Image (tube, rainbow, N blue to C red):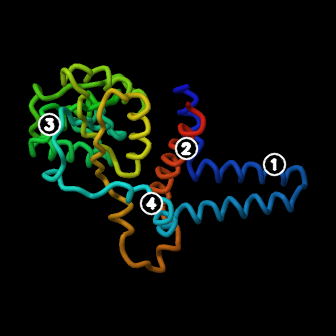
């Protein structure tokens, strides 16, 4: 299932989908089905245009992020642990000594803010790349090694939930462990679904960060918002992945 999810996830991005329609158009051209080919190529062009615009980012991204409030770390409730999802941070120590933070950097920073605010005594980075990327950054930002409980085997959010639940089952004897779940705002709805389904023994409190759609688009519209650019093509591709992943689990994984 993990391999299938990765294959589907790789294909479900705006560029890959557009290329599939271009390929279908080329096949139709070779078969002399020129009208069908024109329709497919126009669709591919229109698809890429729409998915590369800020206005589309507003339409599909803001509803995801606005389900979760923007909250200062000082105002978050207390818990037994802070679970931070790595978010694609990478590291190649043979080439460069520091982690490539990407959007995962916001998650790590917010976990540190929560820890410094005294919201939980433990920080749990979870993900198969976190040991070489997230953990060194947490240490650099002042989280002591004694406060870290590292889960470094999970390959996706479902496994994050399963493995963290096992790791934290004994941190609060006699009651459900209370967890502050830190991840990007567009990812939080899917992450909550995974944790509620696969870690029911934990009490999950969402603490969203990395509100990049709200920050980039919560302003009056401009003419440029209707024209595509690569930044929004990437952002909208991440949103598409979250939408498909969420509804895929809701409808297909019982």
Q: Position of residue 215 (x, y in %)?
A: 32, 64
Q: Which mark is residue 27?
A: 1
Q: Residues within 10 Å of mark 4 (few under 14, many from 20)?
A: some
Q: Position of residue 231 (x, y in %)?
A: 44, 60
Please say if 103 is above or below 214.
Answer: above
Please say if 22 is above or below 156.
Answer: below
Secondary structure under tag 3 reads loop
Give the CA distance from mark 2 to mark 3: 32 Å
Could you tell which of marks 2 and 3 lies nearer the N-terminus? 3
Which mark lies nearer to you, 1 or 3?
A: 3
Give the CA distance from mark 3 to mark 4: 29 Å
Q: Position of residue 33 (x, y in %)?
A: 89, 56
Secondary structure under tag 4 reads helix
Q: Residue at x 32, y 37 (%)?
A: 85
The quadrant of the picture occupied by the N terminus is top right
Q: Position of residue 220 (x, y in %)?
A: 39, 78
**Circle 3 sits on which residue?**
120
Which mark lies nearer to you, 4 or 1?
A: 4
Q: Residues within 10 Å of mark 2 (few under 14, many from 20)?
A: few
Q: Which mark is residue 17?
A: none
Q: Nearer the viewer, residue 203 or 36?
A: 203
Q: Residues within 10 Å of mark 1 (few under 14, many from 20)?
A: some
Secondary structure under tag 1 reads helix
Q: Which mark is residue 247?
A: 2
In this picture, residue 146 sits left or right of residue 40: left
**Circle 4 sits on which residue?**
63
């Amino acid at each position: 299932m993990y391999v299938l999810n990765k294959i589907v996830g790789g294909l479900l991005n705006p560029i890959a989908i557009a290329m599939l329609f271009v390929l279908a158009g080329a096949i139709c051209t070779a078969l002399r089905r020129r009208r069908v080919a024109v329709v497919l190529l126009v669709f591919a062009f229109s698809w890429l245009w729409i998915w590369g615009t800020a206005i589309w980012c507003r339409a599909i991204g803001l509803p995801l992020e606005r389900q979760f409030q923007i909250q200062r770390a000082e105002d978050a409730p207390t818990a037994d642990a802070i679970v931070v999802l790595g978010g694609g941070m990478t590291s190649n120590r043979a080439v460069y000594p520091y982690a490539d933070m990407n959007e995962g950097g916001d998650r790590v920073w917010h976990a540190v803010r929560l820890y410094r605010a005294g919201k939980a005594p433990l920080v749990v980075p979870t993900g198969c790349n976190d040991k070489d990327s997230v953990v060194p950054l947490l240490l650099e930002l002042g989280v002591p090694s004694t406060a870290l409980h590292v889960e470094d085997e999970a390959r996706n959010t479902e496994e994050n939930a399963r493995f963290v639940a096992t790791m934290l089952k004994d941190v609060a004897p006699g009651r459900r462990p209370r967890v502050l779940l830190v991840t990007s705002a567009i990812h939080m709805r899917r992450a909550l679904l995974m944790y509620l389904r696969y870690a029911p023994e934990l009490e999950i409190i969402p603490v969203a960060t990395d509100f990049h759609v709200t920050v980039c688009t919560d302003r009056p519209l401009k003419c440029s918002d209707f024209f595509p650019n690569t930044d929004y093509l990437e952002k909208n591709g991440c949103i598409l992945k979250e939408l498909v992943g969420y509804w895929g689990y809701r409808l297909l994984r019982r």
